[in-house]
Amino acid sequence: MKVMLAQSAGFCFGVRRAVQLAEKIAAGDAPYVMLGPVIHNDHVIKHLAEQGVGCVERVDQVPPGCGVIIRSHGEGKAVYDKLQEMGCPVADATCVKVAKIHQIVQDASRRGRQVIIIGDPVHPEVTAIAGWCTGAKIFRNATELGEFLKEYEENPQKPITLVSQTTSTDRIWSPCREKVKKECTNAEIFDTICDATCMRQSEAQSLAEQCDAMIVIGDRKSSNTTRLAELCRAHCPLVYHISRAEELDRRMVSGVASVGITAGASTPGWIIKEVNHKMSEENNNNAMEIEESFADMLEKSIKTLNTGDKVTGVVTGITPSEVNVDLGTKHAGYIPISELTDDPSVKPEDIVKVGDTIETYVMRVNDVEGVATLSKKRLDSVKNWDTIEAAVEDKTIMEGTVTEQNKGGIVVNVKGIRVFVPASQTGMPRGADLSEMIKEHVKLRITEVNRSRRRVVGSIRAVRAEERAAKAAEVWANIEVGKKYDGVVKSLTSYGAFVDIGGVDGMVHVSELSWSRIKNPAEVVSVGDEVSVYVIAFDPEKKKISLGMKDHNEDPWEKFTSTYEVGSVASVRVVKLMTFGAFAEIVPGVDGLIHISQIADHRIDKPSDELEEGQIVDVKITDIDYDRKKVSLSIRALLNDARAADRDEYDD
């Protein structure tokens, strides 16, 4: 087996400077602590701790009188100000490349420019950069950046300053840079990806193209090491990300012809030597061990992948654009974010974690590059189709959200599958505006599935009918005269209103809608109104229910007699004209008769000569028949009273 070590593997200039500074301080007598790990490597941090240099995460954790080592990733200006206020000696190990970005963004902010940082929002380097300017915007990729730039469409001349995390990749940075160039006319763009990072990434990719397996050494918290592993996976079928030689299993690389070794910028040389030495020992294994390992590798190498296969693998890495999956084959699997979920607001980390076992669907296999494009979304879709098909046989009620209206009905999204519901099966009245159902969460039955044509038909009406039948059975089981219900007005006729009291419609006769005399139910209620009703009568055999709305506890006759008496004057509303006179409403529920002879102080042919329905007139109550509840009214009596009063005044 041929072992090749990358020339630029291991400590970069900035990391080497930071570690040397920390070791120099450790050798001295003054007490110091690191504010956050000086580099992302647990072995180095443990080594420094053994020499007396501890690590704290926050400024308020710094012991009194203790000095502070600023890590290579840097810190925001507020941290420096706080340490100065506390009187803490500071040993600044910030990488000179990172410090340069601090100067760029601080200057841009002073000039009123909008600073945009391309990088990981939670990475200490990025948070430190943001701490040297005001209102910085941080984006992981061009997609996130594009959403923000929509705010600048109307004013592309707004000043923007664009920088990048030093350990980013050109695959992420280039689309962001080009997007800003295209859409912003007043942009400053600084290519701040570290030259050493670019060289290390380029060399790693070149080595990965030549080798059958790659070993990438570095702490798993190290951003630049994680990216090295991602880049290598695009060119090499077997890539292992380890932090020390102890993690290197002999079976990982036994049987391959060539192995490449590279390491992240925070990986010390002694760890790289450990791995390289162990790899050299691998070449001296006895024949039996080699044969066994080779058999394992051979089995993996002949295990082929085909488009449409369902495969299971382990998540080995997550980036803003893809999820890397180890399938245990010669192909490196990855899931593009677009094939992970349909929800743009969900982050990959919310769905999967490194180390998770995940089942996916093979979309494409590239034997030349040794990669397989996978899709979790499509496998979920396959499973969901199985569920949909089973729902037809099992008559399972499904749930979904109405997404659109079309010519013949609506479309409901059920587990990511489009289900067509004809207008007649929506449960809406004929001719209703179906667009009102959009975004509504509904229950439906699947009535037809044609998987080959990707056609699914469902019925909301069927579910609602079943629910209504169940509610109706409950109503009929417990109904009794006088029982009150809260209902909804479903329809109106000339003689009353039909009210749904929970799966059953009852009819409120026009005479039971109100104590007032009304001609049309629409004067009192409208379709869709929520009303309180009570049962007057019911017939279980004919399935008919008579309902009432007016409160019989309020007796209109008692209200009338407690307010008026013979001789009282009242303002009344003419409700009906007859040949012999006019009926007028005194109070709701009590009418009186104005005989034709009492309408005027002169002879008239018919009541309509003087009155019209709906007219308000003043009358005198001339008689009350308490037994038959009849009232006689007179306009003429009031006129006579008025003339008599005028004569008395004239005589005086």
Image: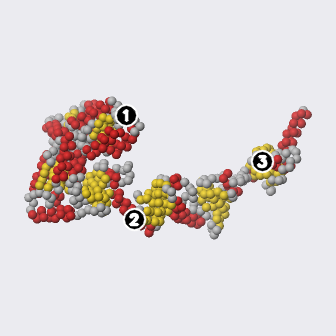
Residue 408 locus on image (x, y percent):
51, 59
Q: Which residue is mark 1?
A: 157
Specify the amino acid type for callout 3: Glu
CA gap, disc 2 and disc 1: 52 Å
**Tag nearer the camera, 3 or 1:** 1
Q: Amino acid at mark 2?
A: Ser
- Badge 1 marks a residue whose secondary structure is loop
Q: State the residue at coordinates (32%, 52%).
A: 337
Q: Residues within 10 Å of mark 2 (few under 14, many from 20)?
A: few
Q: Quadrant of residue 101?
A: top left
Q: What amino acid is at disc 1?
A: Gln
Give the residue displayed 60% in from the left and 59% down from the top: 500
Mark 3–mark 1 contact, CB under 8 Å? no
Disc with the residue nearer the chain's start (3 vs 1): 1
Badge 3 density bin: few <14, some 14–19, many ≥20, Cα 10 Å: some
Q: What distance separates the C-alpha of mark 3 from that of mark 1?
A: 73 Å
Frontmost residue, 179 versus 163: 179
Circle 2 sits in a helix, a strand or a loop, which is it? loop
In the foreground, 405 or 387:
405
Above or below, comparing residue 83 to residue 459 in the picture: above
* Residue neighbourhood size for the residue with mark 1, other residues' Cα within 10 Å, grouped as few (<14), some (14–19), many (≥20): few
Give the distance between the C-alpha atoms of the residues marked 2 and 3, in whole angstroms: 71 Å
Q: Are marks 2 and 1 in contact (CB under 8 Å)?
A: no
Q: Which residue is mark 2?
A: 452
- The residue that disc 3 covers is 612
Which residue occupies the foreground of this view, 382 or 186? 186
List x then y, in percent, for residue 368.
22, 57
